[in-house]
Image (spheres, grey):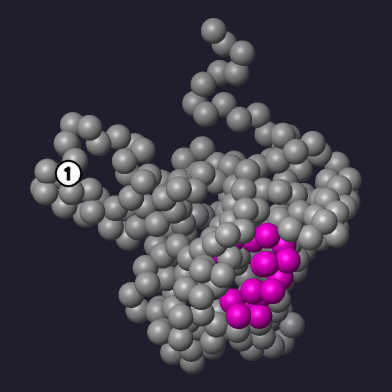
Amino acid sequence: MNSTVEQNRAKDTAESFAQLGLPPEALPRHIAIIMDGNGRWAQQQGKFRMFGHRAGAAGVRPIVTECARLELDVLTLYSFSMENWKRPAHEINFLMGLFEHYILAEREEMMANNVRFIQVGRREGLPSKLLKKMDETVELTAPNTGLTLALAINYGSRTEITDAVRRIAQQAADGQIDPEAITEQTVSDHLYTAGLPDPDLLVRTAGELRVSNYLLWQISYAEMYVTDVCWPQFDVEELRKAIRAFANRRRKFGGVPGAD
């Protein structure tokens, strides 16, 4: 890699840590975000919902860039749930086009920030043009070694778990897996997120106090942070607030810290 690029990345990382005011070991390795409130924010501005979706998409880049600079392992963004297919057709079509535009427009930025892109969710039902753009971006960014950006599109956690159980059951029926040997890790290895660490921090914008069928298996011990700020207003400083809140939590994982 060009030494100038490495030096610039190191400088950006140092500046981000200075602004955050936390050591690397205090940070979550995987942040998952429920990006809520695009439509609500637009309506507050007297605009149509699509205006909010466009603003929300524009707000993704600074968050991804900052997570890359902080050298996090994974950022997973809940972009389109399986339940979102119930929305009006014109809104769905707009969103699919917005995803295509975003994925294409952000390729250069992903490469500049050493970001690896993946999609989590079912492929069935997504437009072929969108799948093509995603596949190309996955292949292009595969060699990158920094942040993994996981875009949850056409995603639903119950469906994910059901699909995993089906695959495991088929492998057991085929004699590839001993049912007695199935563990939690076996299930994790068959989820859409296989190979990724579980989230340490789950952020939800727009103030709703629910997880909305998002990473139900993976967030078992994630710390939750809810802000009233709608996604289009969730900037780098709001991200820092969430990370600082996480750093002040005492994670017990069901145990008692310091106990023998």
Picture quarter with the C terminus: top right
Q: Position of residue 101 (x, y in %)?
A: 60, 84
Disc 1 marks which amino acid? Answer: Gln
Can I make out residue 9 in this image? no
Picture quarter with the N terminus: bottom right
Q: Nearer the viewer, residue 168 or 39?
A: 168
**Image vertical order of residue 233 relative to residue 66, above or below:** below
User: Magenta: predominant secondary structure element?
Assistant: helix
**In which quarter of the view is residue 128 placed?**
bottom left
The residue located at (45%, 48%) in the rendering is: 195
The extreme bottom residue here reads 90
Q: Bounds of the magenta span?
A: 102-117
112 falls in the magenta region: yes
Horizontal placement of 69 versus 161: left or right? Answer: right
Q: Nearer the viewer, residue 226 or 235?
A: 235
**Image vertical order of residue 93 relative to residue 228, above or below:** below
Q: Residues within 10 Å of mark 1 (few under 14, many from 20)?
A: few
Q: Position of residue 126 (x, y in %)?
A: 40, 79
Q: Secondary structure at mark 1?
A: loop
84 falls in the magenta region: no
**In which quarter of the view is residue 44 placed?**
bottom right
The residue located at (67%, 85%) in the rendering is: 51
Q: Nearer the viewer, residue 241 or 97?
A: 97
Residue indicated by mark 1: 176
